[in-house]
Amino acid sequence: MRRAEYQVRKKRGATRKLICFFLLAWTGLTLGQLLAQSTASLGVTVQVARRFRIEISTSQVSFTRSSSTGVPQTIPANEGRFDLTVKTNNDYSSSTNVWFQVSSDLVDSATGYTIPVEKISWQAQGSGFYSGQLSKAAPALVARFTGPGSFTGYLYFFFAEDPNMAPGAYRTTVTILVEGV
Amino acid sequence: MFTGNRPTRFLAAAVCTMGLLLISPVGLSSRVAPQQWTVNINIFPTAITFPAADPDLEPVVAANTPVHIQVTTWPPNRRWEVTIRAEGNLVSAGGQVIPISTISWRATPNDIFRDGVLAAGQNLVLAQDRGNKEADLSFYFQNSWDYVAGEYTQVITFTASLL
């Protein structure tokens, strides 16, 4: 009886060894498969340049005095609201300034008569936008922002009419200047 | 288990072995020369650049060159998988970050190699097939005014594995 039990135990032991061996072999093969890998690296660079963009709703603003009342009056622009959008990817700690720069008064080319450009002013709506008045002496600040983004303001231009101004067609050019600081 | 006389045990063990080898994706032939099984991936070039561009004029910027990818295996008919992984987002020297998901790719031909969008720290399956294959990957960057000026970099890892 004891000998029979011994034989059975011996057989079971041998079987366990066989199973262990096959399991080890299988694990080794699977591991070998896992190790069959290859890698390659790709370096990626994205270049972003500092940029500013100005977008305006119209390239011309005009005022019409159809008849003088005899007293000074304020005439709004015929075009109504002037939309000014400035886009920038300036960095977060830097400012963007927007200026109106004008170098000459309003001039009637037919007569040579002039009207001071300071007669034109604007009221501003929009965060970072300021109301102001055109000036030959120095650029007028229109807006100031910090960091990147797209900023839009709405400007309403006015002309301070004077009854003493001679009739005519007076023109000048205003440059919108954007400056990253 | 596997008790009985010697031939019975041998038979049981043999069946078991065969079963295990069949279950194993390596297959029976690996018993012959597992050390010769290889998969190799090669790409060229190893660096790409997205040049600076106006976001309004070029909302999507193409990389300066496509990337040629080639997978070879031994034996030649082995089944493989290639994954693509961005190790993180695009980061500038100043610490500014652009999400890596702004970069996508298109594969040509794309019957085996797939199109996709990068994801930070994730292995994405680029292709599964068998044998030697190659393709061109064209990468694109989704441009925006929101990205502050600078030079942003990141590493993409391609991994080929035998299945």
Image: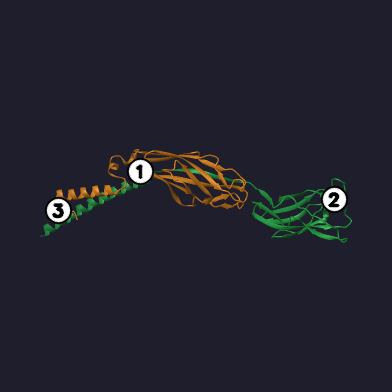
Tell me the SS state at disc 1.
strand
Q: How is the structure coloured here? A: by chain
Neighbours of disc 1 within 10 Å: few (<14), some (14-19), many (20+)? some
Q: Position of residue A75 (x, y in %)?
A: 80, 58
Horizontal side, residue B36 vs residue A150: left or right: left
Q: Nearer the viewer, residue A121 or B67?
A: A121
In the displayed image of the protein, which residue is found farthest to the right? A164
Neighbours of disc 3 within 10 Å: few (<14), some (14-19), many (20+)? some
Marks 3, 2 in one chain: no
Q: Nearer the viewer, residue B102 or B109?
A: B109
Q: Position of residue B29 (x, y in %)?
A: 28, 41
Q: Position of residue B136 (x, y in %)?
A: 47, 40
The residue that appears at 45% across and 45% down in the rendered structure is B158
Neighbours of disc 2 within 10 Å: few (<14), some (14-19), many (20+)? some
State the residue position of label 1: B79
Circle nearer the viewer, 1 or 2: 2
State the residue position of label 2: A168
In the displayed image of the protein, which residue is found farthest to the front? A67
Q: Tell me the kind of residue under disc 1.
A: Arg
Earlier sequence position, callout 1 versus callout 3: 3
The subunit letter for the residue under badge 3 reads B
Horizontal side, residue A18 vs residue A27: left or right: left
